């Protein structure tokens, strides 16, 4: 049906043409509250502020946040800045330990670890023993 115009393939789901997801009023309030909590300290998202999985999925899909795993979610702008800082630091130093990057990023060990594991999975960084290096130093601006 997708080929005939009856359905639109949206990756993990299909929909009718012209349909787009919309939040109910309560979901909109929850999303605004969650985004506001993340904005208070962008490099240190609160670990105790939770949101429904479907609402988190919506925020990820719309590009408002990046879920790096282990319950750590960053506003997209904050995530982009953390990537930029990490790439810059690794270009300058060649490699860095978790504690070094935690300090550079101004975040907690828990958040830094989840973030760096995410960068490893995104093939931006590579863990070598206790240190991280850029996987492809020429591929990332910073």
Image (tube, rainbow, N blue to C red):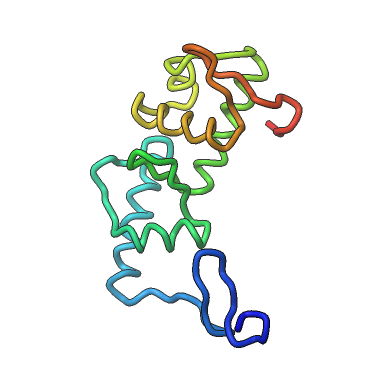
Q: Residue at x 70, y 26 (%)?
A: 136
The vertical placement of 38 against 28, above or below, is above
Question: Compared to 131, does 7 lie above or below?
Answer: below
Residue located 45% across and 33% down the image = 115
Q: Nearer the viewer, residue 39 or 96?
A: 96
Q: Hey, which quadrant is residue 27 in on the image?
A: bottom left
In the image, residue 52 sits, relative to residue 2, either above or below, namely above
Of 50 and 69, the residue lying toward us: 69
- The extreme right residue here reads 138
x then y, percent, for residue 131: 51, 14
Q: Residue 100 location in percent, x, y?
A: 47, 15
Residue 138 screen position, x and y as percent: 76, 27
Locate the C terminus by quadrant: top right
Residue pushed farthest left?
A: 48
For the point 56% across and 69% down, the residue is 10
- In which image quadrant can residue 1 be found? bottom right
Residue nearest the viewer, comparing 39 with 113 = 113
Question: Is 12 on the left or on the right of 40, as rendered?
Answer: right
45 on left or right of 133: left
């Amino acid at each position: 049906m997708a080929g005939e115009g009856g359905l639109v393939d949206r990756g993990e789901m299909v929909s009718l043409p012209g349909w787009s997801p919309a939040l109910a009023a309560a979901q909109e309030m929850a999303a605004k509250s969650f985004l506001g909590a993340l904005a208070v300290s962008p490099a240190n998202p609160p670990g105790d502020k939770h949101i429904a999985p479907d609402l988190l999925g919506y925020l990820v899909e719309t590009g408002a946040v990046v879920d790096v795993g282990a319950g750590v979610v960053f506003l997209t702008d904050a995530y982009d800045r953390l990537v930029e800082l990490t790439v810059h630091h690794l270009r300058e130093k060649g490699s860095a330990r978790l504690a070094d990057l935690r300090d550079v990023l101004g975040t907690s060990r828990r958040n830094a670890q989840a973030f760096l594991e995410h960068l490893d999975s995104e093939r931006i960084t590579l863990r070598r023993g206790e240190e991280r290096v850029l996987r492809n130093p020429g591929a990332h601006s910073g």
